[in-house]
Image: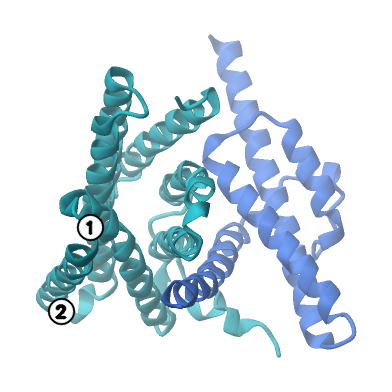
Amino acid sequence: MIAALVLGCSIVFFLQFFVPYCRSVIAASSNHVLSPEVRDVTGLTNPASGEDFRRVVQLLHLCPDRPEDRGEIRAIGVYFGMLNALKSLSRSIAPKVRTWTENELGRCTYFAAVALDRRVAFSRDLLAQQIEA
Amino acid sequence: MPGSASYAILFLGTLLEALVVLCAIKRKVLRRYFVLNLYMVLCLAVSWGRHYVLARDGFGSLNYRYFYFYSDALLTIVLYFSLISLYLSVFEEMKVGRYLRLGALTLLAGTSWFTYAVVSQSSHKILTYFAFELSQNLYFVGLVLTYVLWAAVLKMRQTPTLLVQLVLSLGVYFSFFAACYALSNLHPTLYARVSIFFPVVGCLLPLSWAYAFWRVPNDARLTPARLAMAGVPR
């Protein structure tokens, strides 16, 4: 009984931490201005739409991997999945929640585009260093 | 014997722990988050020790098991103090450091006493079982304390983004482990299956801390209330 209670509490706490964590990661990148190249390649609208997320992530996987942002990209991917599920559930029940989830999905896409921008810049720096060497 | 995937995860975890300390040094926050970095350095030492004992005595040996559980208890205690150091950072301006330290020590002593009281009635291998149970109990205590800390942070207007991310990632880590331990207590046969995820989740904490130290500017601040689930319209 106590174990079941602890399990229930842990799952609730997990969500209470995971969602704000994802939002803090997204918020930290929201001030980043995307380079015109990445904007062209991704074709992002302003504000970004959740529908572009998978495409931007596919582009992200084409760039050389960086260990320090791998976990965050995965976490935002999970958050995106949760939001999508919430969006489907709230479609007819709560239109306000649906609008909010659409905004959040767009912010996830913007985060992925920022990560892409950083990876492109990182690859460019690496190439420049190799040419200099 | 653990497979190559387990070794790869162990190696990745060790690499990430080193990365956290390097990032903290590079961003000049080593002193500010000293206990967190001490925990990472200890993790590195324990990883090396586990690898050494594993190579010498094998995966099924008693030595490895003892080393694993005792080192895990030690790491959990240091992680508990890391959390207390985050409390000290959050409440720095209120000058309540002395009371926080006293409270933290009392809570740790209380948890140890409770664990001993439970273990002494149900096992003859008291010390090993005590180390294992203490880890589990401290994970849950840590989870509750992190939740209280997050609730306090939510009340603040502007908080350093770095601190917010450190607290939240610690909360995710504690809650995942507490859920895994609770699940294995509910169905003891599940422990072997659940424990497979431990090294993977163990990598997530250094990964998120490394990311926070590396990416978040020292002077960046945000309003925590905007991140809470309460922001979701109903």
Residue B48 found in image quarter: top left
As helix, strand or loop, the secondary structure at mark 1 comes to loop
Q: CA distance from mark 2 to mark 1?
A: 40 Å
Task: Please tell me the colour of chain A.
Answer: blue
Whether residue B41 appears in this view of the structure is no
Which residue position is annotated with label 1? Answer: B123
Q: Can you give x and y, in whole percent of width and height, for residue A132 in the image?
A: 56, 12
Position above or below: B61 against B28:
above
Residue situated in front as seen by the camera: A1 or A35 = A1
* Residue at image point 14% right, 73% down: B97
Quadrant where the image shows the C terminus of chain B: bottom right
As helix, strand or loop, the secondary structure at mark 2 comes to loop
Q: Tell which subunit mark 2 falls on.
A: B
| Residue B109 relative to residue B231: left or right | left
- Among all residues in the image, which is located at the extreme top? A133
Quadrant where the image shows the N terminus of chain B: top left
Residue B65 found in image quarter: top left
| Residue A104 relative to residue B175: left or right | right
Residue type at mark 1: give it.
Ser
* Residue at image point 20% right, 81% down: B94
Position above or below: B35 against A68:
below
* Residue at image point 15% right, 76% down: B103
* Residue at image point 19% right, 50% down: B125
